[in-house]
Image: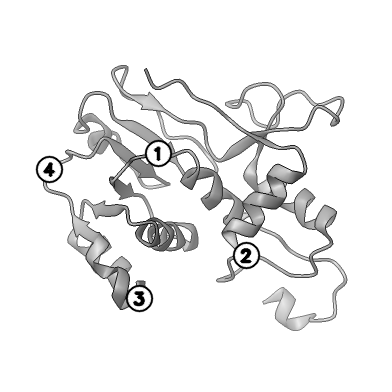
Amino acid sequence: LYIQKHPHLSMKVVDGSSLAIAIVLNSIPKGTTQVLLRGNLSKVAHSMALALCQRGIQVATLYQEEYEKLLIRLPTEFRNNLSLSKGYVEKMWIVGDGLTEKEQLKASKGTIFIPFSKFPPKNMRKDCFYHYTPAMMTPLSLENLHSCENWLPRRAMSAWRIAGIVHALEGWKVNECGYTIFDIEKMWEATLRHGFCPLIVPTS
């Protein structure tokens, strides 16, 4: 609403959604064919479902209501890649705000949880693996940096902060907020080009 009221602002608003999605997509191990998507159906969740389906990954949901809301937003050609889970069997969970402790306890042993939320879920399982929230390691040229968030390792920065930096470095004169999502692949490539590196989490 603020941007609509002030269309001539020289400052741009960047919420970092496209980079958060890109980081999650590139955190999923190669060869993955199915994931469980769980969490509040935010702009990021809807865009995540579409991006996964476009990559040929089968996306499952736990609840009929979530399935129907996601399905209606998917282009017809990708709807076959969305399904209802048949009993917590998926080993790769893409999770956001709204994931419950009860749901975590039903996950299979060895499940990998990759959050797309700004805050991490509570780690309920010692026999599963929890990825960091969307974040990357900063370039070595960035000095005097300690921790961005207290749950991230040293020199790691959240996607939402990185996105603003990259937009400024690239000189992109666009907003990414409201219902708008920037080009995910373009955002990922630019971020790597400026020296940010993926965070590696051991899963074995």
Q: Extreme left residue here?
A: 86
Lower sequence index among marks 2 and 1: 1
Q: Which residue is mark 1?
A: 30
User: What is the three-letter code of the residue carrying label 2?
Assistant: Phe
Circle 1 packing at 10 Å, graded few (<14), some (14-19), many (20+), is few
Label 1: state its secondary structure: loop
Lower sequence index among marks 3 and 1: 1
Q: Nearer the viewer, residue 77 or 100?
A: 77
* Viewer-nearest of discs 3 and 1: 1
Give the CA separation, mark 2 to mark 4: 34 Å
In the image, which disc is placed on residue 182? 2
Q: Which residue is mark 4?
A: 87
Q: Is residue 99 left or right of residue 170?
A: left
Q: Are marks 4 and 3 in contact (CB under 8 Å)?
A: no
Residue under the point 30% across and 74% down? 77
| Quarter of the view holding residue 10 | bottom right
Q: Position of residue 71 (x, y in %)?
A: 28, 70
- Residue 109 in view here: yes
Residue under the point 71% across and 37% down? 196
Q: Nearer the viewer, residue 22 or 12?
A: 22
Give the CA separation, mark 2 to mark 1: 24 Å
- Relative vertical location of residue 28 with respect to residue 200 in this rendering, above or below: below
Circle 3 packing at 10 Å, graded few (<14), some (14-19), many (20+), is few
Q: Which residue is mark 3?
A: 75
User: What is the three-letter code of the residue carrying label 1?
Assistant: Lys
Residue under the point 35% across and 60% down? 53
